[in-house]
Image (cartoon, rainbow, N blue to C red):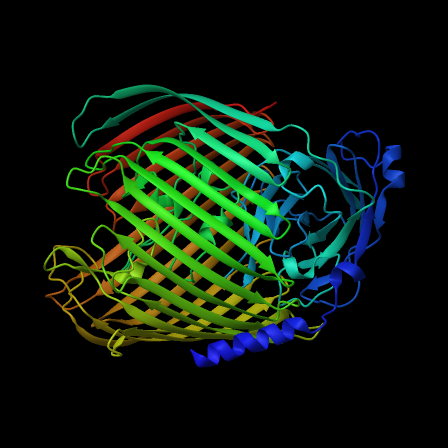
Amino acid sequence: MKVLYVTFLMAIVTMAQAQQNYREKYKVEISSMASDIAIDGSLSEAGWNNASFVPYLTNHWPLDTGRAQALTEVKIFHTEEYIYIGAKLYDNGKRIIQSLKRDSDSHWDSDNFTVVLDPTGSSANGYIFGVNAGGAQTEGTLYIKNNQTEADFNWNNKWRSSVKEYEGYWIVEMAIPFKSIKYSAENQDWGINLIRGDQENNAYSTWTNFPNNFRGIELGYMGGLHFEKNPPVAKGKVVLIPYALTSGSQDFEEESKANYDVEAGLDAKISLTSSLNLDLTLNPDFSNVEVDRQVTNLTRFNIYFPEQRQFFLENSDLFAGFGSWEVSPFYSRKIGVKEGEAVPILYGARISGNVLDKTRVGIMNVQTGAFEELKPENNTVAAIQQNFLKRSSFKVLAMNKQTNKPEDGEEYNKLIGGELQLTTTDSKLSGKLIGHVTSNQEKLDNNAFLAGNISFNTRNIAGAFNYDYVQENYISELGIAPRLYNYDVEKDTTVRRGYYKLNPWMRVNFYAKPESKLNIHGIRTWHNLYYNMDGSLNEQNLNLGYVFMFKNTSSIWTRINYNETNLPYAVEFIGDEYEPLPAGNYQYTRAEIEYSTDSRKPLSANFNWSFGDFYSGTNNSYKVGMNYRAQPWGNFSLDYTMNDVQFNEVYGSKTLHLVGAKTEIAFNSNLFWTTFFQYNTQAENFNINSRLQWRYKPMSDLFIVYTDNYATENLNVKNRSIVIKLNFWLNL
């Protein structure tokens, strides 16, 4: 740990030295215009003639020097209500449109134009707005986690855009309302960057020119957007989002009668200031959220899925951005979900945003109702983030989960913690120190979580060293610490075992010559070493890999993996019909190879084969994924995973199958039909989920969601439901 502290001091010294100021080198003055313009995919209105002009973008990936091969011209101005951005993107007409669906995962794999904004100028948080060549919108929030800029595309808000294709170029027009983003009306200097994805050349370009070891969304390398006078105060202080639904469901396993229900609820967004927001929810319903994709889990620990529910997404990094790679003190899906079942949320309130230019706050309170054996619970989370220097911050988190009607005395779970994040201006060196403690009615000792990391990122070499120290009574009921909880199958109980973890990793990139079919190739190595509190080995996982990335977007991954595990308790990996694998020391080695084809082709695929030992047996795993794109209206994918696990006669053998099929049809840019089929022999479940979404007005939707679950053995229906939900976005 002394080395870590010394490195932090070096980081502070480095940050004190002058770095190239991108916001001075790349600065655009944004002028004010009197009237709004039509968003129609044309830049012919007179207002565009007086807009600020960015004449070209620069290469970012795979090359990061010189002007981009495909010319992009951008114009910017604002009115009292909107920031207008117009872009003319020249090409040869061979555009790739992966999907017309809003917030599609394939945004970066389509020809796209994307704007990154940092309204506070802090280089710590921001927004992203993008469209592909088919006009499909995506938007999200940006934040710093684990020493790099991350994007959360689950955030939604109302804005306008239009795309029109021409011979030799296509045009994007955007109108971003001031009321859709949070900013200080006293701040005239924002951060901005412009990103273009050029699929014909498999290249990405940005306005500012910076090393390609950083992604285009990197907040530390943005240019400056200077307002001639203070930006206007956003109009429209209140948004109401009421919903109504009717549903029917039946549990055939319990032989219960069909249940029919009618519900209504309300979400509200209230702007307290231009940078601080109040969100309210009353009887929220999340039936329209896309179903989780199932996986085969051959680990000893639970797998956690990302949050998709809208109420928890606004400024979500304020609450969810704490912790390390593996341990998160707050995981919002612990509220309103129990073992995959929805727990009723009665109401919730959240205040979040900036109270000063460098000070962000978040306070959230959510009340759940009684559910089966669960009692009503009140959940409170509060966070403060104070930014300092150029790109550093100190954060504090406090949480309390309180049972409303305890029958056997007071029941609560509390957490308080602080985190120091240090990042150099050029983002090449960063580090973090973490300290949390928890408490409950049992008043247990050994209740701390301590962590630290240091990372560096250069064009050719990047790496990090992460350290976690988790005591056995670090109990965060609103968070996740998977390795802390160990299931003892013989006693049918879960035991908490403290541990500490060392995690060094390194990436080495070699850049191919221009005439080569390769873009980049290089070494990847990462190691996870877990130790018990007495210093004895718990588990080690050592990995060495090599990657080849080709100019046609295809790639090859290879790796070899050595594992040593001291199982503390017997474990069931393949089912309770066999004897569990006993506690003891296991050493085994595995190899893996993965190949992905050119994603720009209508038919693309990826193949993965991993093989070798698995504890005292073997496991050959095969994964095949195929996708057919009927541009731009349809995607049809099929994924198959097989794990052939072989132990001896006592511990058994089994072949596990997971089949996932998905059809995604866009009848137009406002009407989508998505259907999942998931057949999982490990979970003994066959799931069908079909969702029709009609966006009949901006941010206002009609959903029809049908769900069926069947047993895999005999395909007998287990449960079935259908939901029809209507919501409406109302600006006041």
* Quadrant of the drawing holding the N terminus: bottom left
Q: Which of the pair 589/365 is nearer the observer? A: 365
For the point 48% across and 23% down, the residue is 242
For the point 69% across and 61% down, the residue is 221
Query: Residue 444's spot in the image, x, y percent?
Result: 22, 59
Compared to 511, does 50 lie above or below? above
Query: Residue 269's spot in the image, x, y percent?
Result: 54, 31
For the point 43% across and 73% down, the residue is 559
Identify the image quadrant of residue 342: top left
Query: Does residue 280 appear to the left or right of 131 in the view shown?
Result: left
Query: Does residue 98 appear to the left or right of 717 in the view shown?
Result: right
Q: Is residue 299 visible?
A: no
Q: Is residue 494 visible?
A: yes
Compared to 98, does 554 lie above or below? below
Query: Residue 333's spot in the image, x, y percent?
Result: 37, 44
Compared to 139, does 526 lie above or below? below
Query: Does residue 11 appear to the left or right of 174 in the view shown?
Result: left
Q: Which of the pair 461/574 is nearer the observer? A: 461
Query: Residue 462's spot in the image, x, y percent?
Result: 56, 74
Compared to 3, does 116 lie above or below? above
Identify the image quadrant of residue 678: top left
